Image (tube, rainbow, N blue to C red):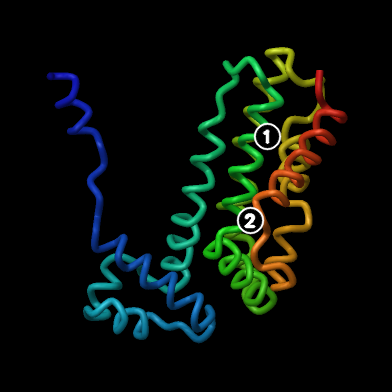
Amino acid sequence: MNSSATVARVKPERDEKREHILKVAYAAFLSDGYAATSMSSIAARVGGSKATLYNYFSSKDELFAAVIEEKCRDVEAMFLGLDLETADFRKLLIQFGERLLHRMLQDDNIATFRLITAESARFPELGRLFYMSGKQRGRQILGDFFAQAQKAGKLRPGNPRDMAMLFVELCKGELVLLKVWNVHPKPTEKEIKATIATAITVFLAAYGA
């Protein structure tokens, strides 16, 4: 009982107002673009005053950074959930690869990718932010996992972060770009499984112990 009370005390409290602002701001950035979205327009959508919005975020840049960090947090949690204790390492990689590809193919992730691609030429800091918060962070976490897999004898020696980059790109295959370009907006489960099966075969051919 005392232990549960301790956990309750240290657990961060949710700030529902902040979460609401981030959700509304994300929708605004997607629908209007970064350049056309202002703190005033976001405040109007939120339904409060600009002063309330500025109490949480001092600028549009800071608000956008918080939106991107929030979007990347769910993906980061996927990388942290990997378990080396499993007896079938190939099966683990296949299961994780399928979850990862499903996540990359979700409409909100595709919309975010399109937004960053469209705006980064005029606002290069947006591209850097997305890269640092998302791709680089995920590569670091997955690289740490592969380093542990090497120590456990499941992978051959190599640069773990390079392994992570290759793994993600192999899992992405062409399905993500085909959806981004609206060539093939709804990949089937069969196509997803086939993409990941090929990805893991290639990955383990290069790095499998």
Q: Residue at x 51, y 52 (%)?
A: 72
Residue 105 placed where, x, y %?
61, 58
The three-letter amino acid code for the residue at tag 1 is: Ile
Residue 112: x %, y % from top left:
56, 66
Residue at numbered disc 1: 94
- Give the residue number, with chain letter if any, for mark 2: 131
Q: Quadrant of the N terminus?
A: top left
Q: Nearer the viewer, residue 8 or 87?
A: 87
**Residue at (19%, 33%) from the top-left corner?**
8
**Tag 2: amino acid:** Tyr
In the picture provided, is 31 more to the left or to the right than 209?
Answer: left
Q: Is residue 119 above or below residue 204?
A: below
* Residue plotted at (72% across, 67% down): 184
Disc 1 or 2, which lies upstream in sequence? 1
**Quadrant of the rendering where the C terminus is positioned:** top right
- Report the number of numbered marks: 2
